[in-house]
Image (spheres, rainbow, N blue to C red):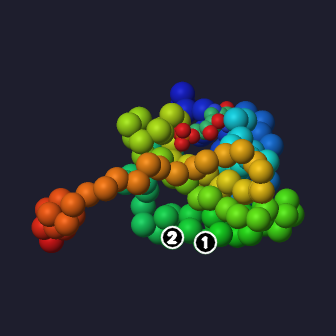
Amino acid sequence: MSDCIFCKIANGEIPSRTVYEDEDFRAFLDMGPAAKGHTLLVPKAHYANLFEMPDALLEKTGRTAKKVAAMLKEKLSAEGFNVVQNNGELAGQTVFHFHVHLIPRYTDDGQKIGWKPGKPTDAELDEVLAKLK
Ligand code: 5GP
Ligand code: ZN
């Protein structure tokens, strides 16, 4: 994709603060980090989101995310870790090249990554379950 910023970064056309690279992926520091060491793991090939990713590459994504997260956690002495992956504008995706956020967490980092829990009734939960069966 000629106009995709993450294609350009992943393939080295645009410089980035790369913390890990192999033949399929690049992991680089996010320019707007949620916390120190916030890293984006991206495939070198362009897929817009999770649903477009081939299964084989997704399997590698899981293994690579774990490896890079462990490295970040150890080297930055993180005390916790969030792995976040957004799909679609409504879900907060702003760059439409699949990426995984690897976010080391620290005491007093001031971040709150999460959601407001709902309070569904049993009937509402059962209705959802029925749709999924
Ligand atoms: P999304 O909201 O799509 O899940 O996440 C996009 C992320 O990419 C954001 O956290 C944003 O800070 C980061 N980002 C966007 N453009 C660039 C860029 O050119 N360089 C870097 N290093 N990060 C970027
Ligand atoms: Zn791309």
Q: Who is closer to the viewer here, 90 or 17?
A: 90
Write the residue at 77% across / 56% down.
106
Q: Alpha carbon of mark 2 to alpha carbon of mark 1: how far?
A: 7 Å
Say whether residue 40 is left or right of residue 51. right
Task: Find disc 2 in the rendering and name its residue.
Answer: 59
Q: Which residue is mark 1?
A: 63
Q: Return the x and y of residue 53 as percentages of the image width and height.
A: 43, 56
Q: Nearer the viewer, residue 128 or 43?
A: 128
Side of 88 where 95 appears, left or right? right
Query: What kind of element bears circle 2?
Result: helix
Instruction: Say which residue appears at 41% left-offset and 35% top-offset.
Output: 89
Mark 2, residues whose alpha carbon is within 10 Å: few (<14), some, or many (≥20)?
Answer: few
Q: In the rendering, at what x and y percent does residue 67 appear?
A: 70, 70
Amino acid under disc 1: Arg
Query: Disc count in the image?
Result: 2
Q: Residue, x 72% and y 45% (percent of image)?
A: 110
Q: Within the image, what quadrant is residue 127 found in? A: bottom left
Q: Quadrant of the C terminus?
A: bottom left
Q: Are marks 2 and 1 in contact (CB under 8 Å)?
A: yes
Q: Residues within 10 Å of mark 1 (few under 14, many from 20)?
A: few
Tell me if residue 66 comes above or below residue 101 in the rendering: below
